[in-house]
Amino acid sequence: MENILLYIILFAPLVSAALSYFLTKKWAGETLVGFSLLVLLAAIMAWFKQPVSSGFDLDWILAGNQNFSIGLYYDQLAGIMTIVVAIVALLVAIFSMEYMKHDGGQPRYFAMLGLFAFSMYGIVLASNLLLTFVFWELVGFSSYLLIGFWFEKDAPPISSFKAFLMNKVGDIGFLLGIFILYAFFKTLNIQELIGLDPVNAAIPNGLLIALGIGLFLAAVGKSAQFPLQTWLPDAMTGPTPVSALIHAATMVAAGVYLMVRVFPMLAPEVLTVIGIVGGITAFMGAFAAFAQNDIKKILAFSTVSQLGYMIMAVGAGFPVAAFIHLTTHAFFKAGLFLCSGSIIHYYHETNHTAGFDPQDIRNMGGLKKLLPFTFMAFTLCMLSLAGLPLFSGFLSKEMILNGLVSADHLPSFVLVFGFASVFMTAAYMARLYFKVFFNQQVAGEKYAEAVSVKVPLLTLSSLSIGFVFSMNPLSPDDSWLLSVLTSYKGIGIADHFVWVPILSIGLALSGLIFSYLYIERKMLSGLVSGVKSLTYNLSNRNFYLDDIYDVAFVSGSKTLAKAAYWWDQKVVDRVVNLMGKTQVVLAYLIGWFDRRIVDGGVRLVTWLVNFAGNRTRQVQGGNLQNYLAWAVFGVLLIFYFFELMT
């Protein structure tokens, strides 16, 4: 029973999902909160009680000589991840009780959250890639349900289908990696594969690269990397607490977690590709956030950018730096999403003007006085995201930037994108910050923020402070997370460069000051207008990726469908009709030949036989005189022939 805590962590959310679905609105939320608290306690107890590198495997499928097993595995990586997911899941459940209090679908909503949590814990604790893939699909299915929760509206079903479809593209790569690994090593157990060291094993280099690219494609889909990042901003059509849980801390982090898990299996060529894709994603996400006006979309593009940072760290060869940023990002980004949920909820409760968009930051302003608690939490989380000293984001981001400087195998533009994204992150978040909480005063009334809102915001903003992760919040190398993960294979601690934090802090402060001068002081209008005229549409339309996909796939598919329809109508149908007519003509000719020739021949033979029979019948009529005459005729005929022969 030493694994009882793992069973609780995994199956308690599933039980809560079943119970929540069949309970009334009053008890559905309380049930999920209670079970989420149980999971968090079990995760904390497992950190202290569960032996490191422990778990179990059970036989699952026996196919001929091949035996596929399933099981759970617990180490420091899984332990930290389960605690992170459990904290965010609990706080989101508490926040949802207030946010969803007027929604009639609460039992279904809380049941879906429980199902998602069960799927996510499965990914974290799975001991082999086959079981990981099963939970990977369950996470995708759960997110599909949650993004499309308000299915009676127009946008959510489309967004949920888009997310599901783009994740399937990555899942194909995941299957490719699984097939290659099993074909060569006859096992899918992650620890066994790491021990076999695929990179240095006798596996052809081409297949090793295909293996790594396949596994990375899975992360590209789940973690919204270039070129599949467009589903994440559109997924904001779901309830805001869902965005905090799925699109800030858990689901989108699953791809990064997978890359950290399988890092020893990745060839150097694959790491280069990963670093380049991560750099492009970080830059594109930050750039696209500038021209957005939907508060949740700004945070969504920010998430895309930060996920790019994590993938860059993996590509640079420092997976632990990626994992630490995953951990810090989970808290401050979930806090930012819940703050946006608090703002949206405020407008839903106080503003009932027809056509008013509670997510458009152009409709906001002066909320510092109206929502003071939300303002305080947003400030702390925003400064952490910007990467300023004394905040958790500074620690993890500096580890990544030092890793990029140390990575000689990555092109120089990846490092440039990394530092440029620091400035852009601070600038677009400051733009959002000043527009929403300062700027002109928008008519509104002070609103009493509920306790179920304050508790999650207070907790997440507190976890965004640097002292939570390091007694020296100015030194990433002193982080307790780093010391805990020192036994992880491929730890790779980057050299510390003094100029990196100086440049990073300078860029972050420059971004904050730039937006302050432009938004609050109404300065730099000429400069911004000139830049906006050149780049606004490119940023607002996310580099026209959706338009490109629309032309290449949607319009292309329509054109192909029209061409196929024309071919079917004009060619296939005509050929079929011609063949039918030809068969009719041939059948008529064959029928005529059968009636006139075959049947005629048969009738002719019958007539000839009948005629011959009638004539020969007279020869044997019983008349002796006729017999004698024919005999004489025959004898004369014989003599005649003999005469001719002589």
Image: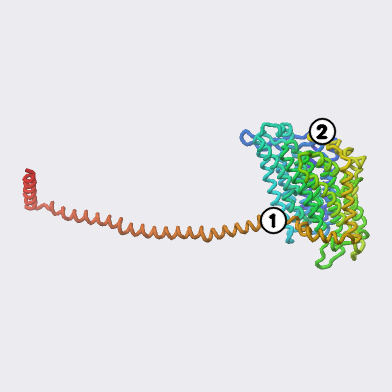
Q: Position of residue 482 (x, y in %)?
A: 85, 37
Specify the quadrant that holds the N terminus: top right
Relative image position of residue 183 (x, y in whole percent):
64, 36
- Left or right of 480, for residue 166: left
Instruction: Give the left or right position of residue 511, taking residue 620 as reference.
Output: right
Q: Quadrant of the C terminus?
A: top left
Query: Measured from the top left, where is residue 545 in percent x and y?
Result: 72, 55
**Which mark is drawn over residue 560?**
none
Is residue 267 something one can see in this rendering?
yes
Label 2: element kind: helix
Give the residue furthest to the bottom: 354
383 or 75, which lies in front?
383
| Residue tagged 2 | 487
- Camera-side residue of 426 and 130: 426
Per the image, the residue denoted by label 1 is 548
Residue at 33% across, 57% down: 593
Residue 610: quadrant of the picture: bottom left
Residue at 91% of width from left, 55% of height from top?
375
Structural crowding at the residue carrying mark 2, measured as other residues with C-alpha within 10 Å and reported as few (<14), some (14–19) or many (≥20): few
Identify which residue, 294 or 542, lies in the foreground.
Answer: 542
What amino acid is labelled 2 in the image?
Ser
Q: Dot 1: few (<14), some (14–19), or many (≥20) neighbours within 10 Å? A: few
Inspect this view and state whether residue 93 appears.
no
Query: 200 above or below 351?
Result: above
Q: Amino acid at mark 1?
A: Ile
Circles 2 and 1: CB atoms closer than 8 Å: no
